[in-house]
Amino acid sequence: MSLRQRWWLLGSLVTSLLLAVAFYALQQHRMQTHVIANAATQREFALAEEALAERAKVAASLLAESLVNPIYFFDLQRIGEVLGGALNHDDIGYVLLIDRDGRILHDGRDSIAQFGQLPDDEFATAAAAVTRPTVFVTEHFVEVAHPITLGDQRIATLRLALKRGDTLAAPLTAAVVMPPWLDALLLASVIAGFVGLLGYGDRRFVTPQLRTDARLQQLARVHAGAAIDVDPNTALARVEQRLVGFERELQQLGGIDALTGLPNRIALRQRIDEAIEQAQAVEDGELALLFIDLDDFKRINDTLGHDVGDEILATVARRFSDVLHSEHPGEQGFIARFGGDEFVLLMSGRDARRRAGEIAELLLSSLRIPLNIADQLLHVSASIGITSFPEDAADASRLIKNGDIAMYLAKVQGRNCTRYFTNYLTRLAEDRLAIEQDLREAIDHDELKLHYQPIIDFDSGHIHGAEALLRWHHPSRGLISTALFVGIAEDVGLIDALGDFALRTACETAVRWPRSAGRAPFVSVNVSVKQLRDHRFPARVAQVLADTGLAPELLHLELTESSLLDGESGAIIALETLHGIGVKLWLDDFGTGFSGLNHLRRVPVSGVKIDRSFVTDLLTDRHDVALTSAIIAMARSLDITVVAEGVESAALAEVLEQLDCPYGQGYWFGEPTHSEKLVELIIAQRYGDRSQTNVVPIS
């Protein structure tokens, strides 16, 4: 049998098999479609009937309320007007008003042709005796019998029926069940497509091979007088070789990241596996993996756009490649884009772990030069985690995971730095993951509470307001650090839920506080930078104020200077909107940022809080005294308020009073406590009872 005959015989067999499978699949599909259509139709019936019954109940209830007085005064004209108006709706089939004796009082028509008659339908007796709205269903109507009462006495019964419309069963079935001609067309398309494919294969592979075989036979007869035994199967073998080569090319292309030109995650994983095998084959074989993540890249991407973000990634990739291959040409390294803004560098050879630290410093240094992207200079930094084989991990998956954990530690400890993996970090990461899961439940299970620390007026010694501080008392872990769980909430996207809870709870609580020294105390709530970047945040604040009734000027929102760095135009717009509705804005930890005076000029702030790091050393550091005094004087000249944080002793309070600081906050005046205790302190001050409060009057 010739090669062409084999080809078409094989094609015919495959075509027949495909047709059989396709025909069987179509039949199964048709059967399943009928089942689904029938089930859907029944569901549509049920839903439509439920909706119709609800509409009938609502309509009957409204009519019943309108009929009480006309029935009591036997005003048939008014009853007719009410019922006649209902009958004007096309979907109402009939309406009957039944008196206490079960007879028709009115049918909504001018002639009242059925007046005094007993209804003769199957539900007449049951409808006349109902004590609450009851639904009756017939072939053409959905009826509601609604008792009409005056006080505890039933004076009539209203029967209102809505027409049952056509079902959706036919359109639904027509929509999902294919007609027979479409089945035939589909099968014909399969046959035509496969025959075309066979013809293409004949022209592309079989015919050229037959020509080659014929040429070889001709050459054999000319030169040797004998036929050369050429196996026709070599055609298929050559096709297979070509396919294998093509597959290899696809794999090579699939291992390259299109944006940066670096190897991608797939190629990286293969390279790590190979490197581990090579390291295991030699004595003292060692690998080091650097897991690199750009700092705050999401904010840059969201602010400047994905096109700029892509240019940043491509530029960073080139710089990293230059570090590896140009500045350190003797280094045997492999760098890949792991995904998003993450890169991974793999190093092998003796002492790889130590050399990885040197390379990490070069990578960070390469980013200290601003990137010129879209006609603007952008500052980018990275956090790097380093782990090694075989010291930290025995396989690729664990090596990558350990690098990720070490990178996260670098993020937590300030960013723009390098950290090595240790086994302690694994426990830390697992513990953090457990806290993350528990935090999601804590928000729903009311485990989070707000405590309030009083802010004191130095002149009067009275409570001027209080800062709301979030506390989480875990059922098994006890009190969780606020900085820890708030940081986790920001990382995993829970900060909005956390912030909304704190804002609403604080406002609901503060609106109930008694007045102190003739004025209502304010409540201060901390706001994260991620909340400020959300354009919906001002509207949420306004809604909370409207819901709780708290005056806008009694809500103080505290934000750190760092939230206003790097041209946070979105945050500035949000703050201006909040200022416009009367909310007070405060800069927290003032003096620790990079451009505090510039913030006071750009942001509509009402006050600043002097950072506790300045206040703590007022008794021993004259520079802190000078800085604190300057901040107070500057605030007075700008007509904004000042609060000194971290007042822990009477001596510190005395120094701050001498510096004309108007307000103070700290454990000397009162520790954070629940709202009920704060109210007791306010009331005690109102009546001059200082014995029940930690608040110490300064004047």
Image (cartoon, helix red, strand yellow):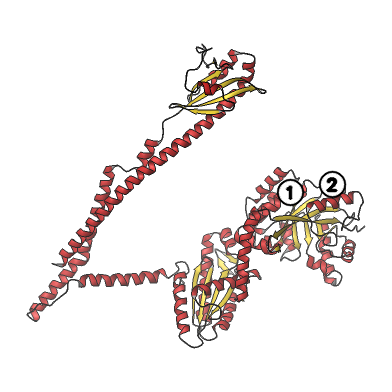
Location of residue 210 in the rendering, given as x and y in whole percent from the top left corner: 16, 69
Q: Residue at x 68, y 58 (%)?
A: 528
Callout 2: 10 Å neighbours few (<14), some, many (20+)?
A: some
Residue 555 - label = none
Residue where numbered disc 1 is placed:
507
Which secondary structure lies at badge 1? helix
Q: Residue at x 70, y 53 (%)?
A: 502
Residue where numbered disc 2 is placed:
515
- Three-letter amino acid code at the position of disc 1: Cys
Quadrant position of residue 83: top right
Q: Is residue 177 left or right of residue 554?
A: left
Image quadrant containing the N terminus: bottom left
Q: CA distance from mark 2 to mark 1?
A: 15 Å
Image quadrant containing the C terminus: bottom right
Instruction: Kindly tell me whether residue 507 is visible in this rendering.
Output: yes
Q: Residue at x 81, y 58 (%)?
A: 642
